[in-house]
Amino acid sequence: MWQELRNELHPHGVEIVTVAMDAGGVAAAGPWIAKAEPQHPALIDRAHVVGALFGIVNVPSGVWIDERGTIVRPPEPAYPRRPAFLDRVVPPDASAAERERIELVRALRVDAEGYVAALRDWVDLGARSRYALAPDEVLRRSRPRPFDEAEAAAHFALAQAMHTQGASADATLHFREAHRLHPTNWTYRRDAWSLAGAEREAVYRTSWVEEVKREGVENYYPPLRL
């Protein structure tokens, strides 16, 4: 999705770097990257290092870094264009569960047009853009990491290591604890569910629909503060 926007902005001195936060590594994320045929750096972050450093809890998220290496906008929902799922039609023969999932996905808050317009403004005006935030505002908007979230990160790291070593049952216990301690970190949930495969709902006794409803669909992607 990002390649088209990169083609537009790269001649103006901008580089886009995409990072797939996926514990499945190349096996899981590689085919998606290959299909996109990116001409920009496309990295894979198995250990969620980027998430820990920047406070990213859902994808896609964007962080703006200027030519001096200074963050001018902390993580926020970042879609380069309107996603197709917002316009998906519920089939007439859809089951109640299918209907609920489609309607929930369509209710997700996405402002791709606003985000891209702000990005273009920054590319044109640089530090003079009203969307380029001062350092104190970047700090104010950045997510703090309370103890529970730090502990969740430790459980997530343990779970990944155990899963790699084949101790899937023990890994599941730590994944569950990471989810309990940091329920709004959807990257943790997504990875754990992906590693569990088709049995994920039975293993974790929940589903994406149930968790989004519990946390509130309006909180899945917080509103852009442009």
Image (tube, grey):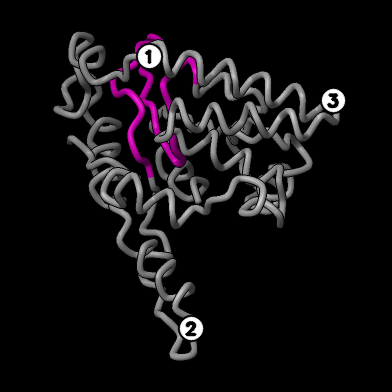
The structure residue drawn at horizontal position 58% and vertical position 35%, both measured from the top left corner, is 40
- Left or right: 140 with respect to 172? left
Q: Amino acid at mark 3?
A: Gln
Identity of the amino acid at label 1? Arg
Name the residue at the right extreme: 166
- Name the one closer to the observer, 4 or 94: 94
Mark 2 and mark 3: Cα distance apart in space: 40 Å
- Regarding residue 110, the answer to whether it shows in the image is no
Distance between the Cα atoms at labels 2 and 1?
41 Å
Q: Which residues are magenta?
A: 52-78
Q: Earlier in the sequence, mark 2 or mark 3?
A: 2
Q: Amino acid at mark 2?
A: Ala
Q: Is residue 101 above or below residue 92?
A: above
Circle 2 sits in a helix, a strand or a loop, which is it? loop
Give the quarter of the figure containing the C terminus.
top left
In front of the other: 106 or 100: 100
**Element assignment for label 1:** loop
Q: Position of residue 94 (x, y in %)?
A: 48, 83
Name the residue carrying label 2: 94
Residue occupying the point 75% across, 21% down:
161
Name the residue that disc number 3 marks: 165
Q: Earlier in the sequence, mark 2 or mark 1?
A: 2
Q: Which residue position holds label 1?
A: 145
Residue 208 placement (x, y as % from top left): 49, 53
